[in-house]
Image: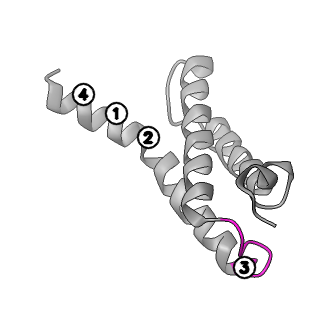
Amino acid sequence: MNPIDLLWHVLNFFAPAAGVGLIAPTLAKLLWRRCLAGVRWARLAAWVTAAAAIVLLAGLVVFGRDGKMATYGAMVLACAVTLWWFGFGAGRRWSGAR
């Protein structure tokens, strides 16, 4: 495998995390516009993307391969918990949002 193929494999592995990490905060900011007015979209997107990427890596380690539905279910759950934590929960206080 040459370096370009390796790069494409890594980018495609993290693509679901990036997709969910960009779409979920956007929809959350649209649905709860007033509640999330003090929280920056970029901050939510960064944390959700990181959580989803960590779950994808954990799924690869646990199952020995990627693409398992259990991993994607855990990724969605991790994204929901992360959005709640940094949008509405105790993590919101870290950003100075009120």
* Whether residue 74 is situated above or below residue 43 in the rendered picture: above
* Whether residue 60 is situated above or below residue 12 in the rendered picture: above
Which structural element holds mark 1?
Answer: helix
Residue 17 image point, x, y percent: 51, 46
Residue type at mark 4? Leu
User: Do the residues under discs 4 and 3 have CB atoms within 8 angstroms?
Assistant: no
Query: Which region of the structure is painted magenta?
Result: 31-39
Return the mark for residue 31: 3
- Toward the front, the furthest residue is 96
**Residue sitting at x 16%, y 25%:** 3
Residue type at mark 2? Phe
User: Do the residues under discs 4 and 1 have CB atoms within 8 angstroms?
Assistant: yes
Magenta: predominant secondary structure element? loop
Return the mark for residue 62: none
Q: Nearer the viewer, mark 4 or mark 3?
A: 3
Which structural element holds mark 3?
Answer: helix
Name which of mark 3 and mark 2 comes first in the sequence.
2
User: Do the residues under discs 2 and 1 have CB atoms within 8 angstroms?
Assistant: yes
Answer with left or right where residue 11 lies relative to residue 56: left
Name which of mark 1 and mark 3 comes first in the sequence.
1
Residue type at mark 3? Leu
Q: Identify the residue under disc 4.
A: 6
Q: How many marks?
A: 4
Residue 78 image point, x, y percent: 71, 44
**Residue sitting at x 56%, y 41%:** 50
Distance from disc 1 to disc 3, alpha carbons, whole Å, reads: 32 Å
Distance from disc 4 to disc 2, alpha carbons, whole Å, reads: 13 Å
Residue type at mark 1? Val
Distance from disc 2 to disc 1, alpha carbons, whole Å, reads: 6 Å
Q: Identify the residue under disc 2.
A: 14
Distance from disc 3 to disc 2, alpha carbons, whole Å, reads: 26 Å
